[in-house]
Image (cartoon, rainbow, N blue to C red):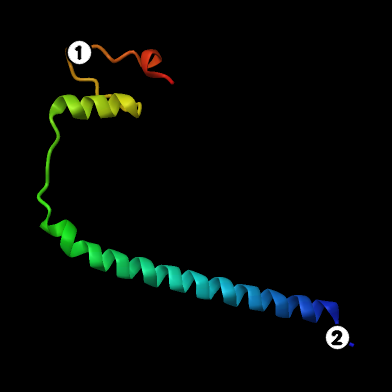
Amino acid sequence: MTDTATVAKELEGWMLDAVHKTNTVAYEALKVLTDAVKPVTAAIPSVTPPAGLRLCRAVHVGRAEVRPGRAAPDRAAHAG
């Protein structure tokens, strides 16, 4: 008769092996994807958005820049 502790250890080993193989496959897939995208993204020129767009985006995510001589934006108005 097989000891339940032995069966549990074997089952745990199989599960850990399966998780390790899955992680390895996912890692390799992401590596292939990033290696394929690198040449494309390197060919795209860098674009700097206008200052107003940067400020709108910063206020939207709650990281508004406060510049000297300007009041801080009202965050309560943007809370949602």
Residue 16 locus on image (x, y percent): 61, 73
Residue 1 falls in which quadrant of the image?
bottom right
Note whether 1 is above or below 15 in the view shown. Answer: below
Q: Is residue 16 left or right of residue 28?
A: right
- CA separation, marks 2 and 1? 76 Å
Q: Secondary structure at mark 2?
A: loop
Relative to 58, is 17 above or below? Answer: below
What amino acid is at disc 2? Thr
Residue at left 64%, top 73%?
A: 15
Q: Residue at x 69, y 74 (%)?
A: 12
Left or right of residue 29, residue 18 in this image: right
**Residue depicted at x 85% and y 82%:** 3
Task: Determine which of the numbered discs, if any, sits on residue 2 in the image.
Answer: 2
Residue 23 in picture, x, y percent from top left: 49, 69
Q: Which mark is residue 25?
A: none
The answer to whether mark 2 and mark 1 are in CB contact below 8 A is no
> The C terminus is located in which quarter?
top left
Point out which mark residue 70 bears: 1
